[in-house]
Image: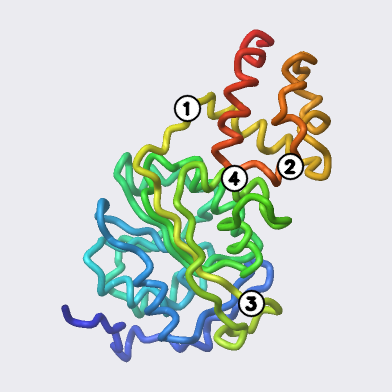
Amino acid sequence: MKKYKPSHNKQSMQDKSDVRAKKHLGQHFLTDENIASKIADTLSYEGYEKVLEIGPGMGVLTKYLLDKKAEIHVIEIDTESVEYLENNYLHLRGRIHEKDFLKHDLSKIFKDEQFAIIGNFPYNISTQIVFKVLEMRDQIPEFSGMFQKEVAKRICEKEGNKTYGILSVLTQAFYEAQYLFSVPPSVFNPPPKVDSGVLRLKRKENFSLDCDEKLFFRVVKTAFNQRRKTLRNSLKSLNLPDNLREDAIFGLRPEQLSFQQFIELTQKIEPYAISAK
């Protein structure tokens, strides 16, 4: 397959210096071509035909995605970046969406089709991006990209560790999470003050839970909101009967439970939660 190269039409070519990284958008433009290529390779491109890149900036990752056997869409809130992409990535015409990913209804782009998500994510909204992916898990079989290293590690962390939390449990309930590699600040412009990390999420074949999913989310969030306490104390607000709270699992702290144990905990709570409605 031929390597895609941006347009170099003198009339349309826009200088990269015209696009400034904006602090309020959390922008740090990736400048390392090798890392961009590695990130593009983190998706399998199997089981779906379309890919959405979040926050493409000036397209350092985009150009490698355009080499793949997939229909590439990009979503970008920064007007300067959108103008740059429209002038230099003519292959993307009609697939550059100047929208806020967190607020935009993606069904307007993909309807009910399966699609993957990838990107060098703005650190100030990266966890919100993951929560939106979880909401749309029926349509998103694969997800990969760059986060602040601490956040990427937290998402992939296993039970028994201090960094294990809400995001770890909720993500791993539906996806296989894998931390892939670390990235130093020096490959960005401007350099962030922290290291970055790239992860991949691959949706499980059977990703529906054997419990009430809304209750599962509530139990996990309520438990970790007081993570130093045992579940017996942190889940008091659920008004569970004393005989249920005597179960051995309630003597544990939330960070000690795997996502599967949280599912089992939700199953124990479910009869009482339903009767309380």
Circle 4 SS class:
helix
Residue hosting label 1 = 210
The crowd level at tag 1 (other Cα within 10 Å; few <14, some 14-19, many 20+) is: few
Circle 1 SS class:
loop
Q: Position of residue 75 (x, y in %)?
A: 44, 60
Q: Disc 4, disc 2: CB below 8 Å?
A: yes
The circle drawn on residue 195 is 3
Q: Position of residue 64 (x, y in %)?
A: 33, 76
Q: How far apart are labels 1 and 3 at the CA level?
A: 37 Å
Residue hosting label 4 = 169
Mark 4 residue type: Val
Residue hosting label 2 = 224
Q: Position of residue 235 (x, y in %)?
A: 77, 29
Residue 61, placed above or below residue 162:
below
The crowd level at tag 3 (other Cα within 10 Å; few <14, some 14-19, many 20+) is: some
Q: Disc 2, disc 3: CB below 8 Å?
A: no
Mark 3 residue type: Asp
Residue at far bottom of view:
10
